[in-house]
Image (cartoon, helix red, strand yellow):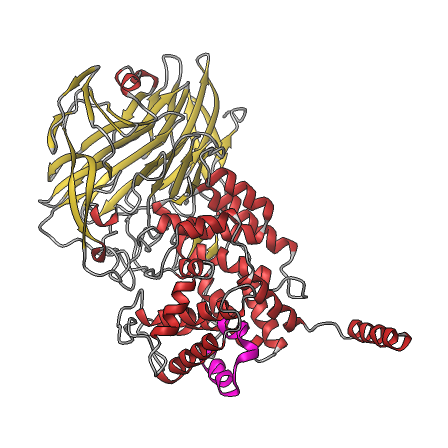
């Protein structure tokens, strides 16, 4: 007994002298992350209930599907239906699509089988039949040498999926399989920028783990964490948005992949010298709270944050992917996001303009609105690899108003993409839909695009100059309403010009009023805007001006997902769509519009709504402005004068966005932002007294400054 005890003691001492290698810890972390049984967690229950499936183009949502717990029926089918050569007949190995490439499903199945094989408590745990199937499927892939015309699958997508499978299956790899595994992983090399750089370095890291090369693991890790910073040309921006492919907001595409991947790496490197520092974790957590928390509503991601990936269920599954990422990074941050973005409580309220992305979000307890614009600084949208084939107007002032987040969910194949909510554009069903500009082109030929927020309310403005069409657009976001102005609408084309107010799923009765009196609703009919009011699905639409025609429609529409995302087959779908738009006619000359959206409206509230609480001071080419609760909000495009009251006159010497608060006939405070992001100072006169203030510099250009009214000249 004494000898046995001494042997055990000696073994423990030797083990302490030679602790587990860091690569062994990394491999163990892989096992815990990918094989951990969390089927009882609320997030996993949500995922099981809403599985993404496999017909998707997004890397992150594909990895979300990889998290779905063991499916016995699928594993049985994989074993039963595997051909003698190791392929599956239901996969098109000759597919030439650049997005949603069908052969990618083969590596996905290998990983799924490996997870079932390596998971204790699963029926197929270390099953000889499943092991044989895995080896056969790997052998086919090694020999087939399949390549996609889209470099992404060859260098990022396939190595990322198979790299995880190889590490989990490490002890069962034959010598030849290990050689072939390394050969596939060598398709990934250090390089590129932003999230592509992170993906590639992560794949190199997995190859290094297979080769037990700690120095290469460390090199890959250092490249990965080099992207945990803000303020670069791509990646996390100073306003906590995320850019990729140039100055382009990519919250839901590359940005989501970034935060999701970083959350995985934070777990993979845990308990080693490679672990993320506290500062790196703080940056990632702040990206969640100051960026992503703004764009999720009732468990779905804002359409304007999705990027070019407008596939079925994208808002739901991208939001769910974010929830998993937050949960992996920080329990505290995850709790904040879950309570504010994934429940009916919606306790996170406020107004924010992302000044480096031309993107505005306004959140209230029972609704959220988002606005996407573009400028010569900011690329509005892109279309690549058959994705987003209709999104040409997506950043021309698209305004989405959400209450329960179902308003636009999966409506993409049925939309008239020339009439996105909030957008002023050409309407011509007989001409081909323009394609989104390539990433090296601007989608709006002006820099007067920006926003101003006091944290609760705010305004945004955009001078739209595109394809011979001009429109000065202005939005004011308040507690109970959104005020929308347009002026200077002109075009050099004979095509009709329209401004869309709404285009969403039809839900319930459409009610139309002239003042307080109901009038009959006829699908597709034109209505005079004189005191016109419309109610649909708890949203009210109210018009300030009397001139012009409004078309209201609620009809069954047919469409095709393939027209939006070419990875889908050409299959017709249909549904009932509600829409409102203004027809400005052909070759309009200095046409204007002004209307209001009232979330949370009912018939009594709408019919008796006090428009006087929102006083329009001006809607012309010099100034667009409104007064609400003793605060004037103004977009000043040219130096000009505005009388705010009988006792207050403001001479704006500097163009830009203003918030002017008035108490007892006197100006109490002034806030200003420069939408052009080119000015150094702002100057104005209040009752002939001049005030001047320095503006933020560098990356903070375009942010809000409080002008001191004590600085009189």
Expressed as whole percent of the image width and height from the top left, the position of residue 106 reads 37, 72
Q: In which quarter of the image is residue 98?
A: bottom left
With respect to residue 150, does 674 lie above or below?
above
Residue at 42 percent across and 70 percent down: it is 156
| Left or right: 643 as drawn, with respect to 261 | left
| Left or right: 37 as drawn, with respect to 683 | right
| Left or right: 653 as drawn, with respect to 166 | left
Main secondary structure of the magenta stretch: helix
Looking at the rendering, the stretch of residues picked out in magenta corresponds to 164-185
Quadrant housing the N terminus = bottom right
With respect to residue 133, does 404 lie above or below?
above
Please say whether residue 176 is one of the residues in the magenta stretch. yes
Residue at 23 percent across and 36 percent down: it is 506
Which is nearer the eye, 318 or 126?
A: 126
Expressed as whole percent of the image width and height from the top left, the position of residue 512 reads 19, 23
Residue 89 visible in rendering:
yes
Q: Quadrant of residue 462?
A: top left
Please say whether residue 76 is one of the residues in the magenta stretch. no
| Left or right: 359 as drawn, with respect to 43 | left
Which is nearer the eye, 145 or 78?
A: 78
């Amino acid at each position: 007994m004494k000898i046995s005890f001494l042997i055990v003691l000696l073994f423990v001492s030797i083990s302490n002298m030679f602790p587990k290698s860091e690569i062994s810890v990394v491999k163990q972390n892989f096992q815990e992350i990918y094989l951990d049984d969390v089927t009882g967690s609320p997030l996993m229950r949500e995922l099981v209930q809403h599985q993404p499936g496999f017909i998707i183009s997004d890397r992150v949502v594909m990895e979300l599907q990889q998290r779905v717990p063991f499916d016995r029926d699928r594993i049985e089918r994989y074993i039963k239906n595997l051909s003698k050569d190791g392929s599956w007949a239901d996969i098109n190995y000759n597919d030439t699509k650049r997005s949603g490439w069908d052969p990618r499903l083969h590596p996905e199945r290998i990983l799924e089988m490996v997870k079932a094989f390596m998971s204790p408590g699963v029926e197929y745990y270390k099953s000889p039949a499943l092991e044989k199937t895995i080896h056969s499927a790997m052998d086919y892939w090694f020999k087939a040498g399949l390549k996609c015309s889209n470099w992404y699958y060859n260098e990022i997508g396939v190595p990322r999926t198979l790299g995880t499978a190889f590490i989990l299956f490490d002890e069962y790899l034959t010598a030849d399989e290990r050689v072939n595994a390394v050969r596939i992983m060598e398709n990934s090399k250090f390089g590129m920028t932003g999230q592509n750089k992170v993906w590639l370095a992560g794949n190199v890291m997995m190859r290094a783990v297979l080769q037990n090369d700690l120095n290469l693991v460390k090199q890959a890790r250092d490249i990965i964490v080099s992207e945990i910073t803000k303020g670069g040309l791509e990646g996390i921006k100073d306003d906590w948005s995320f850019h990729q492919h140039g100055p382009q907001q990519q919250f839901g595409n590359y940005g989501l992949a970034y935060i999701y991947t970083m959350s995985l790496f934070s777990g993979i490197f845990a308990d080693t010298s490679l672990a993320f520092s506290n500062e790196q974790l703080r940056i990632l957590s702040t990206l969640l709270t100051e960026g992503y928390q703004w764009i999720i509503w009732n468990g779905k991601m804002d359409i304007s944050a999705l990027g070019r990936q407008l596939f079925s269920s994208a808002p739901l599954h991208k939001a769910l992917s974010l929830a998993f990422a937050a949960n992996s990074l920080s329990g505290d941050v995850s709790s904040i996001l879950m309570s504010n973005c994934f429940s009916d409580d919606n306790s996170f309220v406020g107004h924010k303009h992302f000044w480096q992305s031309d993107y505005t979000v306004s959140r209230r307890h029972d609704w959220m609105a988002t606005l996407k614009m573009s400028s010569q600084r900011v690329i509005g949208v892109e279309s690549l690899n058959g994705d987003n084939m209709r999104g040409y107007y997506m950043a021309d002032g698209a305004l989405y108003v959400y209450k329960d987040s179902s308003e636009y969910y999966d409506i993409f194949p049925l939309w008239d993409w020339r009439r996105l909510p909030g957008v002023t554009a050409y309407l011509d069903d007989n001409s081909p839909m323009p394609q989104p500009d390539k990433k090296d082109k601007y989608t709006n030929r002006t820099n007067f695009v920006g926003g101003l927020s006091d944290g609760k309310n705010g305004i945004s403005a955009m001078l739209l100059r595109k394809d011979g069409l001009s429109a000065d657009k202005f939005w004011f976001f308040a507690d109970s309403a959104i005020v929308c102005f347009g002026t200077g609408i002109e075009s050099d084309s004979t095509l009709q010009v329209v401004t869309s107010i709404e285009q969403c799923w039809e839900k319930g009765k459409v009610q139309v009023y002239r003042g307080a009196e109901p009038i009959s609703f006829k699908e597709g009919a034109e209505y005079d805007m004189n005191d016109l009011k419309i109610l649909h699905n708890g949203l009210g639409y109210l018009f300030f001006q009397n001139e012009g025609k409004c078309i209201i429609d609620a009809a069954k529409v047919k469409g095709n997902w393939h027209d939006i995302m070419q990875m889908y087959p050409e299959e017709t779908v249909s549904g009932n769509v509600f829409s409102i738009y203004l027809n400005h006619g052909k070759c309009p000359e200095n046409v204007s519009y002004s209307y209001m959206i009232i979330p949370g409206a009912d018939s009594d509230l709408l019919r008796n709504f006090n428009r006087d609480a929102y006083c329009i001071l001006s809607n012309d080419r010099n100034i667009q402005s409104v007064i609400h609760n003793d605060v004037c909000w103004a977009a000043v495009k040219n130096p000009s004068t505005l009388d705010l009251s009988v006792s207050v006159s403001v001479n704006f010497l500097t163009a830009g966005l203003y918030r002017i608060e008035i108490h007892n006939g006197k100006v109490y405070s002034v806030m200003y932002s420069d939408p052009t992001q080119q000015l150094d100072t702002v100057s104005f006169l209040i009752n002939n007294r001049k005030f001047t203030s320095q503006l933020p510099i560098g990356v903070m250009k375009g942010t809000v400054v409080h002008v001191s009214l004590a600085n009189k000249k």
